[in-house]
Image (spheres, rainbow, N blue to C red):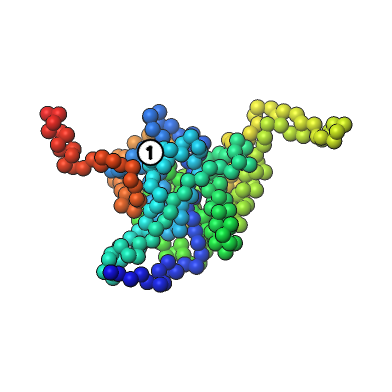
Amino acid sequence: MGYGNIYSGTEGIYKSVGCISLQNYELSFEQPFKVYMTPVGYGFTMLEAAITNCLYYGVDSIWITVNDDELPWAKKCVGQLGYDPVRYIDRFSINKTDQRKRVPIYFVPTFTRYRDYCDNYTFGFINAGLMAKKVYGHVSSYCEPDYYFFSSPFGLLDPKQLREKRSEFKSANKKSLFYHNGQTALDGIHLPMCIDKEQLERLKKHTLSLSTGKSRTTGEYRDNGLPVFERLPPEETLKGKRLTANETYSCLEEDEFSHYDLETFFNIESWDDYVDYMSSDLKVNKRSLLKRKYVLHPMTKETWKNGQDKTE
């Protein structure tokens, strides 16, 4: 029997969480399944690729913002936990899996106060971070995450690039901004980035300041003291639901982050982008890090050959 090291998990004092958004995205391939369930490798989907990026970055938990109507799809696509790839196999232990670090995965809704007001796709990352901060904060203010790693299912990259520079993420300036061809997430590209608590609160306030409802006050008051409202024109109604990533992230500056370049990256915003990825040499397949149980009849090479023989 292997014995656990009492210093396991103490390589970093700060806590970080992964944030993924699945709400109100506009991409559609006109398929009978959700876009984030599109395969990007053998038995591997876009959503699982985004979770794998979080695992390679080294987060302690993963929070996914998803609408109520899509929650069953997301739960069926992903299990309840993943494993840290750095501590997946302990070669110095009798039982090689003793030191595995489990990373729980949580599905959270949009806060009621933000629903149908500013719940755009980009705000889904912010909402996941705010939910993680609130839940951990109920335990203690010392349990609140220090950093929030944003990972989009529509930005495909080789997670080994994150693994190679993981020691740099945990030292010096931990706020990370990833570049590809001179562009970042601040330019509206589905690249990952990591922010701190102050930036998360700034993003929330900035998004709320740009959002509008269906009406506004005229400055006049009724006899009973209540304000008089007037309906906004269609182009100004619910502006927060239509905010782009550029507008949401406009309050952040590149000088606040540590900069890292990614050699391979694919920004999936159309079917042609997906075709370019599938025709490339990059094939992401790290399903062993995710604990899935929804596959009742996995397709193996033997079952595939048997099926071929029966049809012939």
- Residue occupying image coordinates x 32% and y 65%: 98
Q: Residue furthest bottom?
A: 6
Q: Secondary structure at mark 1?
A: helix
Q: Is residue 67 above or below residue 8?
A: above
Q: How many marks?
A: 1
Could you say where residue 262 lies in the image, as x and y percent from the top left?
41, 53
The answer to whether residue 61 shows anywhere in this view is yes
Q: Is residue 4 above or below residue 302?
A: below
- Name the residue beneath numbered marker 1: 37
- Residue occupying image coordinates x 13% and y 31%: 310
Viewer-nearest residue: 93 or 258: 93
Viewer-nearest residue: 303 or 126: 303
Looking at the rendered image, the quarter that the N terminus falls into is bottom left
- The kind of residue tagged 1 is Met
The answer to whether residue 192 shows anywhere in this view is no
Determine which quarter of the picture holds residue 117.
top right
- Residue occupying image coordinates x 87% and y 31%: 223
Q: In the drawing, does residue 99 fall left or right of residue 146?
A: left
Q: In the drawing, does residue 266 fall left or right of residue 127?
A: left
Could you say where residue 176 lies in the image, as x and y percent from the top left?
49, 57
Q: Residues within 10 Å of mark 1 (few under 14, many from 20)?
A: some
- Residue occupying image coordinates x 53% and y 42%: 109
Looking at the rendered image, the quarter that the C terminus falls into is top left
Q: Residue furthest right?
A: 223
Could you say where residue 86 lies in the image, as x and y percent from the top left?
35, 62
